[in-house]
Image (cartoon, rainbow, N blue to C red):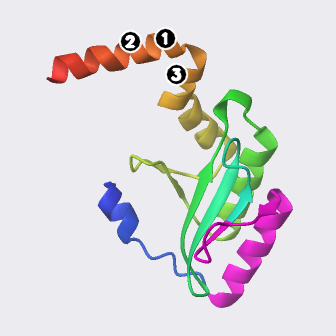
Amino acid sequence: MSRDQLDAIRLGFSDADAEVLLDRLGSILPEKTSWSTRLRIWGDEKTDDIQVGLNGQSIEDVQVRLNVADLSLLLVGAICDLSRQFDCVLATRDGAIIQPNRESVLRTIMQSSAVQFVRDPQRFLEEAIRLDQEGA
């Protein structure tokens, strides 16, 4: 899916489901004070966090960021469990759709550019520069 297609999806949580989801997120990561009334944040944006964009009481989007340098398998499992509870799939920033099970999520993480960077930052950056030069 393209970024525009992902952005166009309406999540459609009922008010009751939204309340349960927000409650469950608090059992996964601690909630922190947000800089916006339209955003609730659990965790720490420097490591692992979950951000929920709101429009009034309606959930507009849910974003999960994981620290691949210190990956928490418990957190991955909790996110998968919660996604399945609400019959959701996961999507990467580039539009790949992932079934919410640990194996699929971990496989996607291990193939990500974030993991490639963590494993060998110099090689990753050299490759990025080479690709930029080829595209110019």
- Name the element at disc 2: helix
- Name the element at disc 3: helix
Which disc is residue 126 wearing? 2
The image quarter in which residue 87 lies? bottom right
Q: Which residue is the site of mark 3?
A: 116
The CA span between labels 1 and 2 is 6 Å
Of the two numbered discs 2 and 3 in the rendering, the one whose residue sits closer to the viewer: 2
Mark 1 / mark 3, whichever is N-terminal: 3
Q: Nearer the viewer, residue 27 or 43?
A: 43
> Which residue occupies 31% across, 17% down?
129
At label 2, the amino acid type is Glu
The CA span between labels 2 and 3 is 12 Å
Label 3: few (<14), some (14–19) or many (≥20) C-alpha neighbours in 10 Å: some
Can residue 97 be found in the magenta stretch? no
Q: Which residues are magenta?
A: 14-40
Labelled pair 1, 2 in contact (Cβ < 8 Å): yes
| Residue 24 place in picture, x, y as percent | 79, 69
Mark 2 / mark 3, whichever is N-terminal: 3
Which disc is residue 122 wearing? 1
